[in-house]
Amino acid sequence: MEEEEGAGLHLAVWTVIAVLLPVLITLWCSVRRAGRRGLSGAGKHTWKETDLFGRPTYCSVCGLHILQGGYCLCCGLCADHPCVWKASRRFTCKEGLGRSEGARGHHWVRGNLPLCNLCVRCGLQCGGQPKLCDWRCIWCQRSAHDECLHSDLKTEDCDLGEFQNLIIPPNYLLAAKQMKKSKNTDYEKLLSPVGKDWTPLIILANTRSGNNMGEVLVGEFKGLLNPLQVFDLSKTSPFKALQLCTVLPPNSAKVLVCGGDGTVGWVLDAVDEMKIKGLESFVPQVAVLPLGTGNDLANTLGWGAGYAGEVPVEQILRNVMEADRVKLDRWKVQVTNKGYSLRKPKVLSMNNYFSVGPDALMALNFHTHREKTPSLFSSRLVNKAVYLFYGTKDCLIQECKDLDKKVELELDGERISLPNLEGIVVLNIGYWGGGCRLWEGMGDEPYPLSRHDDGLLEVVGVYGSFHCAQIQVKLANPVRLGQAHTVRLILKNSRMPMQVDGEPWAQGPCEVTITHKTHALMLYHLGEQTDDDDDDEDPSSDSDQDIPHDVSDGDKKA
């Protein structure tokens, strides 16, 4: 008996140690980090502090192997904490704005090269020795051995490498700035060093999306492009960031939005604001790197259902260069409260879908709890698990039942008789609910494929949360109510959850009118989508099902 008690005591002690030790180590590291001199003010470099480098790293000042310290997001310089300030004084960083309008030479940084880099002179691998060695140009990304870096490489002009068509050269920005002061912008003169086929790319990243992936991407894109063309949307608004388009040649700019569908909508609203202010000739084409939870718009445009770092950023830039231009319908959703009210009608922009019913209820519950504890909702997997929980809960409670008795639906002015539904979804794009092709359903009935550029909305009904789940796993079809150019929905006498593009709210009696607003210029990538298409569709038969007229050879009319 005493031996059992002793064993239990030992187990309890070791359990306490196992729990407390990581906490104490974390606190100790935090105290040490707080006691250090901050790195953010160390010169003109964009220093990022790390407690453990992910690969063998050597200090750019003293050459010693280091486990922790700081590294510059823009130029890749690495240093331990005692050498950070010395590095800032000794080495210049990647300059986004040039000092002269002439051609620019290479900017070589020594050591800590990426893996599998080959010497531009001899073709052998660089950076393989366990020491600070070899060089890399931080603009064109070319590498050279210490013994291969002759005077000609040091003095030759840098052509900016593989991504020269996406990079905004520092000397271009300087020349554009000087021309803007003189109020005489000669784009032919500005384009002479970069070429007429130049399509500069602006990065707009939401660092709050994607489990910190947005912050990682900001650093990686700054290392490959001009730091001045990479924006963190938590610090700079989309409209302010897009002002960079006004110093670029008309109709040349591309934008890569790193974030969820909500971030894309935010950027497209800023693009519409540019049109209103007479800057339509500078409106960019928009690509999407999906970091959100659902990512239905990104999936529709061929950019995949979610990004978690599995594709190198270099390949992402190649995909943007190869992408085709398409149009995306944007819709105006006007919500007018019934009865006497001093409030103006709520006006929203819609890119993906509008819904009332169980999916809006799940989004509302999720949104409410995320606002209370945002730190718990930083993982895409956790977010989908929470959606699953609320969907299961609604299957039992059925908060949205008898919707057909609470609403009236009109499509292009024609009243639609509704069956016993719990939800109505109005679709602009092919995907819904995190990768489900709702309008086509199981694909066993001859319905026209949905498009996102035909000026038509697809309207479907669902019987409840369980029906939604069946549709997502292809065990049921939605109730197809029709297609229309204008949708009008009247909520008579109840309070129901509604959502537009994942932004939910609880709505009392009202009238909802959805009309066409404008088109947005998007970039379509012929890449991977969800498994929804691969399971039951022949690739040859659906290669143009979601591609508008700008890309598809056929001319399908929905």
Image: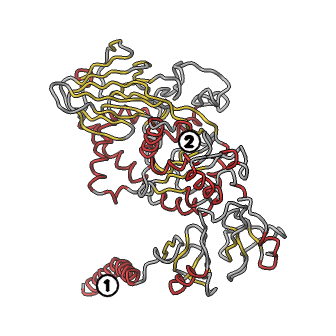
Label 1 or label 2, whichever lies nearer to me, is 2
Label disc, if present, on residue 284 of the rendered structure: 2
Q: Quadrant of residue 477?
A: top left
Q: Residue furthest left?
A: 340
The one nearer the camera, 475 or 281, is: 281
Q: Quadrant of residue 356?
A: top left
The one nearer the camera, 339 or 479, is: 339
The one nearer the camera, 548 or 223, is: 223
Q: Indicate the position of residue 417 as horizontal and vertical percent values.
A: 32, 14
Quadrant containing the N terminus in the rendered view: bottom left
Q: Indicate the position of residue 351 as horizontal and vertical percent values.
A: 44, 34
Q: Residue furthest top?
A: 414
**Which colouring convention does the figure follow?**
secondary structure
Q: Is residue 558 left or right of residue 366?
A: right
Mark 1 or 2 closer to N-term? 1
Q: Is residue 142 above or below residue 257?
A: below
Query: Callout 2, which amino acid?
Result: Pro
Query: Callout 1, which amino acid?
Result: His
Label disc, if present, on residue 419 of the rendered structure: none
Q: Is residue 262 above or below residue 439?
A: below
Can residue 469 be seen by looking at this rendering?
A: yes
The one nearer the camera, 21 or 362, is: 362
The residue tagged 1 is: 10
